[in-house]
Image (cartoon, rainbow, N blue to C red):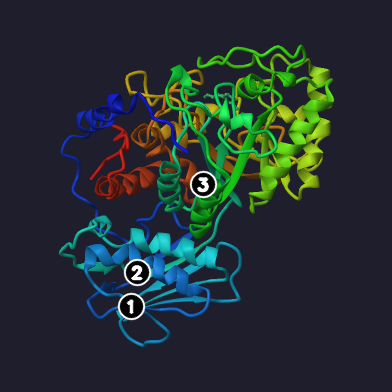
Amino acid sequence: MRVTHLAVAAFLALPLAVTTASAGPGPAPLPLSISSVLPAPAEAIPGREGFDLTPDTVITAGGPAVAIAEQLAAAWRPATGFPLPVVEDATNNAIKISLDGRLDGEAYRLGVDRDRVELTAGTPAGLFNGVQTLRQLVPAEIESRKIQKGPWTIPGGRINDRPRFAYRGAMLDLARHFHTPDEVKRYIDQISRFKINFLHLHLSDDQGWRIQIDSWPRLTSIGGAPGTGVRGTGGGFLTKAEYREIVEFAAQRYVTIVPEIDMPGHVNAAQVAYPELTCDAVAPRPRIDIRVGYSSLCAGKEITYRFAEDVIRELAAMTPGPFLHIGGDEAHSTPHADYLTFQERVLPMVGKYGKTAIGWQEIAAAKQPNAIVQYWNHQAPPLETTGRVIMSPADRAYLDMQYDLLTPGGLHWAGTTEVRDSYSWDPDQLLSRVPKELVFGVEAPLWSETLTDLAEIEFLAFPRLVAIAELGWSPRSTHDWNSFKARLGAYGPRWTRQGVHFYSSPQIPWS
Ligand code: NGO
């Protein structure tokens, strides 16, 4: 459900202005090779001859592979104008997509030679990953929605690829400014091309509440009303039907949604709707500024736990994925003992409804044997925990940090973050007191204090999200800034054709 935005027009020209100012004529596109892929494949061996897509090329697939084959055909038909039928069998001029029980999880293998392309994986998710690789191996004109000339040569060679980390996430903040289901879907479509497999949605905060909860209807009728975005812009919330549609759209791209309700801090919008959730039962005023740390649920009241359990139960029921995020950050106005009491009662509720809890790094202080901790604050004392950790260091992985002080949008409380800063760290070496076996993966959060529309989202996310995606997917042995920046520079024309408002960083040799 969308409530009108006031500030849509203001931004649109900005990313383009920055883009052209810093880009210049740029080098000519590099010839594609089997390793021109983002994120870098685990192993890529060039071959002699490539495969030409022609009007007679067919895609072969059976069983669960058919849906993935259809996705590939749909991606390539508009620009090639070729029919690319998905058939059961063919010998020549074929792209063969099949499941192979010897592979598992998200891994895939790709072989390209003159007569055929073969993509195999143990699961549909693996095939989907292989298709994202294949899509990057044909020239950028393939991204056009109108027929282009070609030739459509896929460079020859072999790829043997698998992820370094199981969790490779991105996050959108719908609370500070609401983003519509269509905007969220477009973002999912973009991130899934880089093998990001989780999207965390920050659905509640001091300003607004963005997900329908039937047992507490004023959360959205008041907390999602017009004007509940930062500076009074926007407003809106996801109905359960819209949320389920997003979940389904994401599932088709092998992205799992992780919903977050932030507690016990960041709850002003809920308390405006239900004053009984404060200790003194007095309704606070609605807040549209961007200060943090002033609101808290009341750990001493039973209604707090009824509220938490109702929300968790309804959220779990509409979420097929394994994780629920319960926030836990910056509860500066919750006394520490109350914070522990709250978390030690609420974290287990997530398990009761069949999910694993994730919380921001502050939850590490509570007894939370199964919860996953999301590291974010590089300024806090060293994180210690015995559970799994998702790495989102604000000075590297927060996509809402400005690139530099002159680029539009974003904040800079954690410093400015150019593309090279987001690429140059190692997720399992950053925290001295967390053993590397506990690092579950990486996530790139994008907070929306300054963001009202998709152009602004894309400008901050791209290209830095790709740096985080590569840290999450590619083996450390492939980590190489020069290689990364060349592959990224060659990717630019794809975003241009897709109409993605990326920041053309002066650090990257854009083709
Ligand atoms: C912090 C804070 C958020 C802000 C964000 C802005 C976390 C986990 N809590 O990150 O409320 O939106 O910074 O960068």
Q: Residue at x 75, y 40 (%)?
A: 371
Residue drawn at (31%, 49%) of the image: 491
Q: Which of the two labelled residues, at mark 1 and mark 2, occupies the earlier sequence position?
A: 2
Residue lying at 55% horizontally and 15% vertically, measured from the top left: 287
- Amino acid at dot 3: Glu
Splitting the image into 4 quarters, where does residue 93 fall?
A: bottom left
Q: Which residue is mark 3?
A: 242
Residue 240: percent from the left, percent from the top?
Answer: 58, 45
Residue that carries the numbered disc 2 in the rendered image:
73
- Secondary structure of residue under mark 1: loop
Tally of marks? 3
For the residue marked with disc 1, what is the amino acid? Answer: Pro
Mark 1 residue crowding within 10 angstroms, few (<14) / some (14–19) / many (20+): some
Rendered position, 60 above or below 262 = below
Residue 85 image label: 1
Q: Position of residue 181 (x, y in %)?
A: 45, 43
Residue 366 makes an appearance in the image: no
Q: Which labelled disc corresponds to residue 38? A: none
Please identify, in this view, whether the residue under mark 2 or under mark 3 is nearer the observer. 3
As rendered, which of 190 and 349 lies closer to the eye?
349
